Image (tube, rainbow, N blue to C red):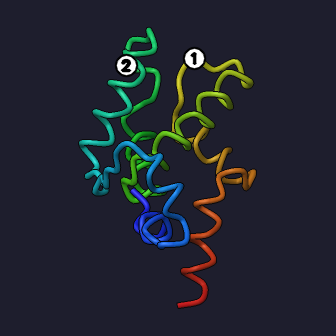
């Protein structure tokens, strides 16, 4: 999922590292519906109902991560932790916004800085 990392690993100076990597996959960003389904699937796989993250919150997560699976998973993990710490049983847009407001999801900060520099 990180073309820059792939290029770095293919550098001849890192040949020893490249030999130890069994497989490399590049996932394209997911569309909004696929993010909703990914979140539901992961929640069910973890023993939940799949409904712990509301659809509006999942759509907000898609917007903040641009559908990059690794970032979707990171933001979901943080939002679930925040919901638990707030004694909420669901992640809604307010919980996701709390994560973003606290500045702990660095990908959102980087995107904001890039938008400012344009």
Is 118 left or right of 83, judged from the image as shown?
left
Question: Front-most of 81 and 94?
Answer: 81
Residue at horizontal 32%, vertical 37%?
Answer: 36
Crowd rating for badge 2 (residues with CA inside 10 Å; few <14, some 14–19, many 20+):
some
**Local secondary structure at mark 2:** loop
- Real-space Cα distance between discs 1 and 2? 12 Å
Q: Quadrant of the N terminus?
A: bottom left
Q: Which residue is label 2 attached to?
A: 50
Question: Front-most of 12 and 114?
Answer: 12
Image position of 74 with respect to 13: above or below: above
Q: Position of residue 30 (x, y in %)?
A: 28, 51
Q: Nearer the viewer, mark 1 or mark 2?
A: 2
Residue located farthest toward the top when viewing the structure as drawn: 47
Residue at horizontal 42%, vertical 21%?
Answer: 43
Residue at horizontal 37%, vertical 19%?
Answer: 50
Q: Position of residue 69 (x, y in %)?
A: 39, 47
Is 27 left or right of 65, judged from the image as shown?
left
The label shown at residue 89 is 1
Crowd rating for badge 1 (residues with CA inside 10 Å; few <14, some 14–19, many 20+):
few
Splitting the image into 4 quarters, where does residue 108 fall? Answer: bottom right
Image position of 39 with respect to 71: above or below: above
Image position of 67 with respect to 72: above or below: below
| Count of residue discs | 2
First in residue order: circle 1 vs circle 2: 2
Residue at horizontal 31%, vertical 56%?
Answer: 29
Q: Are marks 1 and 2 in contact (CB under 8 Å)?
A: no
**Local secondary structure at mark 1:** loop
Residue located farthest toward the bottom when viewing the structure as drawn: 118
Question: Front-most of 96 and 9?
Answer: 9
Q: Position of residue 67 (x, y in %)?
A: 36, 53
Q: Position of residue 15 (x, y in %)?
A: 49, 63
The label shown at residue 11 is none
């Amino acid at each position: 999922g990180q073309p820059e990392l792939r290029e770095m690993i293919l550098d001849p100076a890192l040949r020893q590292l490249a030999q130890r990597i069994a497989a490399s996959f590049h996932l394209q960003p997911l569309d909004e519906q696929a993010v909703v389904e990914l979140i539901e699937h992961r929640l069910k796989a973890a023993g939940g109902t799949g409904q712990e993250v509301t659809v509006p919150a999942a759509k907000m997560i898609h917007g903040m991560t641009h559908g990059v699976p690794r970032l979707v998973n990171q933001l979901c993990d943080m939002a679930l932790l925040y919901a638990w710490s707030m004694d909420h049983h669901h992640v809604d847009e307010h919980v996701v916004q709390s994560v973003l407001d606290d500045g702990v999801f660095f990908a959102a900060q980087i995107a904001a800085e890039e938008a400012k520099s344009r």
